[in-house]
Amino acid sequence: MMMMMMMMKVLLCLCASLAAVRCVPPVQTQPEQVHVSYPGVENSMLVTWSTADETESVVEYSLWGGKLFSHTAKGTARLFIDGGPENRTLYIHRVTLTHLIPAAAYVYHCGSDAGWSDIFFFTSLNESTSFSPRFALFGDMGNENPQSLSRLQKETQLGMYDVILHIGDFAYDMHEDNGRIGDEFMQQIQSIAAYTPYMTCPGNHEWAYNFSHYRNRFSMPGHTENLWYSWNIGPAHIISFSTEVYFYLEYGLDLLFRQYEWLKEDLQEANRPENRAQRPWIITMGHRPMYCSDDDGDDCTHFQSYVRLGRNDTEPAAPGLEDLFYLNGVDLELWAHEHTYERLWPVYNYKVLNGSSYVNPKAPVHIITGSAGCREKHDGFIPNPRDWSAFRSTDYGYTRMRIINNTHLYLEQVSDDQYGRVIDQMLLVKEKHGADSWR
């Protein structure tokens, strides 16, 4: 009897020990959600990824065709705590690769000896001002119904694009299920973002916890954790900014004024004669458009658009952006938010300037490309388009853009509903840039 009791005690202790072991979660240091972006420093690329637990931040890389992983770069990891009830944590790793050969193909993987990612590749940016960069443009893509993603995956890995611009609204929504929806989305876009610089701006669906998922998960050049920044590529100066500072005032009216002052300074610098001569195209990207002909009651459907004209219900009154962009000779303004595609005639203050011509237009051109696909499906249009609406479509799809040279820019809309058919085209010709070109 005594022997039996001792054996039972041993068994109970053993079971308790095994249970305790099972209760300890395994260490998770396998890299996920890999993406690359341009940090705004010549001859460099920034690699970002996530792990569930803390580990080193290392990228091993090499020129395509050379000795594999001949170079090593180390970076840092930052703890990110989701604002949901579980307070889930992630480690966001960032490593900058420097002294890259311009326009060269590189192979890389990231992680540490505790776990490595798959092998990916990218082409470093061509730093020449005569470079003709190719872009994929879209906004409003979720991990439910990401209609355009498979076509973008194939085209990206075929090397069709030098840069991807995602103009706000990711995952729908990153903070849901204590951040797990964000994890799923970032893993989903790895198939394009690990191969081509993935440049972003915030949209309204990133609102939660003061835009914390957007601020932390993406890595853009400088300035207020990705809310606004600018960078140069080929003959273009590209400005990304937040339209959301006009709508989420609970996060601080000061953000709106700080961004406005930054935009003024950035545009002033871009318009210095020596800078505008080198990079004559100024292109902006922001989520909520100034104009649209959708029927969903959004800001741009009203004559008084906050983004366009500002807010007079704040103290002090908040300035809008249409005059600022017009007076600084912005050539092209890219938007999303509306789950449609719409190309506008050159427009300023609700007036079409230069008729139906894209040759030396007398006002900026606006493009809305928010139909990549998400759980909210399509938006609709008002029956009769405005005078400034040149073409519109509710097809799922995305936009391709190529800056050909200092004077010519080509843009086309791809319909995923029509199996990749190009449904709209525009050739924008600017023989003169800057505010003087409007006269």
Image: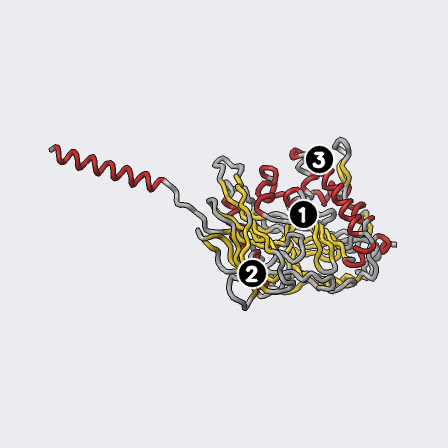
- Which residue in the structure is indicated by mark 3? 254
State which quadrant residue 362 falls in: bottom right
Q: How many circles with numbers are drawn on the protein?
A: 3
Disc with the residue nearer the chain's start (2 vs 3): 2
Assign a secondary structure to mark 1: loop
Neighbour tally class for label 2: few under 14, some 14-19, many 20 plus, Cα within 10 Å? some
Q: Which residue is mark 2?
A: 153
- Crowd tier of the residue under label 3, counting other residues whose Cα lies within 10 Å: few below 14, some 14–19, many 20 or above: few
Quickly name the residue at label 1. Answer: 287
Q: Position of residue 393 (x, y in %)?
A: 67, 56
The type of colouring in the image is secondary structure
Q: Are marks 2 and 1 in contact (CB under 8 Å)?
A: no
Camera-side residue of 267 and 59: 59
Q: Position of residue 387 (x, y in %)?
A: 79, 53
Q: Position of residue 13 (x, y in %)?
A: 25, 36
Residue 398 in sight in this render? no
